[in-house]
Image: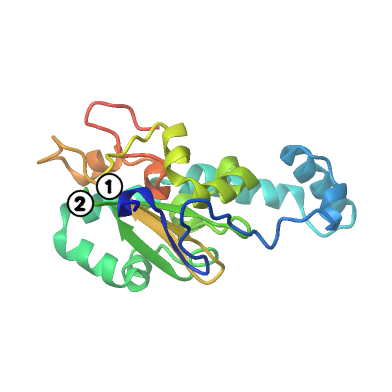
Amino acid sequence: MQSEAAVPVICGWTQALGAGQSFFMPHDHHDHPHALLPPDPALRVKALETILTEKGLIDPAALEEIIDTYQNKIGPQNGARVVARAWSDPAFKAALLADADPVLAELGYYGRQGEHMVVVENTAQRHNMVVCTLCSCYPWPLLGIPPGWYKSDAYRARAVREPRKVLAEFGVALPDETAVRVWDSTAEVRYLVLPMRPDGTEGMSEEDLAALVTRDSMIGTGLAKAPGEAAA
């Protein structure tokens, strides 16, 4: 019999998978119009942008401003501030884990792509990992624009089927006794991982702690940096 550590627990509309079981992706078929677009994601985006611009449906300048805002003014630093405060303030952490929405709203982190948030905590016993199996639902107000790999078919399928292998490819090696739990983001709920606080950070300020928090650590495909490491 497999141990809990070897069997991922899938949360959301998905179900737990045992050895040898497959994961059915109802959206993975090739008769959609998007199958006619270029295979490269960047070319797809450019083709769609060109078509929509020609039809007058989007303003390229406004689109660039939105992208710049989420990449450079928001990005993952908002989430990092939340994590750093949770590491420093036990009462804040308890409230965040119990009901994240009002806590985040009070900090000004809400709106589109972040309407309903759930924060899940990594511990020595359990490592959390987030995926969106249907598309690319992602907490933009906290993490900015999702990385390309998060939206890829490979990550969406493999994160559910073989999370430990995926984590290993990201450089995350977990002890056998640590269970892996995969959370499926949807349009109704998005997840933020609260990574474990690194050793040797006692007495550090929230600002210094936030510098140790990476985007991937809040998705679950990475760990927080150790003191002295440059935050990625």
Query: Is residue 69 visible to us here?
Result: no
User: What residue is pinned by disc 1?
Assistant: 178
Q: Nearer the viewer, residue 63 or 101?
A: 101
- Estimate the x, y position of residue 212 in percent, counting from the top left: 29, 37
Q: Nearer the viewer, residue 145 or 16?
A: 16
Image point 41% across, 54% down: which residue? Answer: 8
The mark closer to the camera, 1 or 2, is: 1
Q: Is residue 227 left or right of residue 19?
A: left
Query: Is residue 142 visible to us here?
Result: yes
- Estimate the x, y position of residue 88 in percent, counting from the top left: 17, 52
User: What residue is pinned by disc 2?
Assistant: 87
User: Colour scheme of this structure image?
Assistant: rainbow
Which badge, 1 or 2, comes first in the chain's sequence? 2
Residue type, mark 1 in image: Thr
- Estimate the x, y position of residue 70 in percent, counting from the top left: 54, 49
Image quadrant assignment for residue 135: bottom right
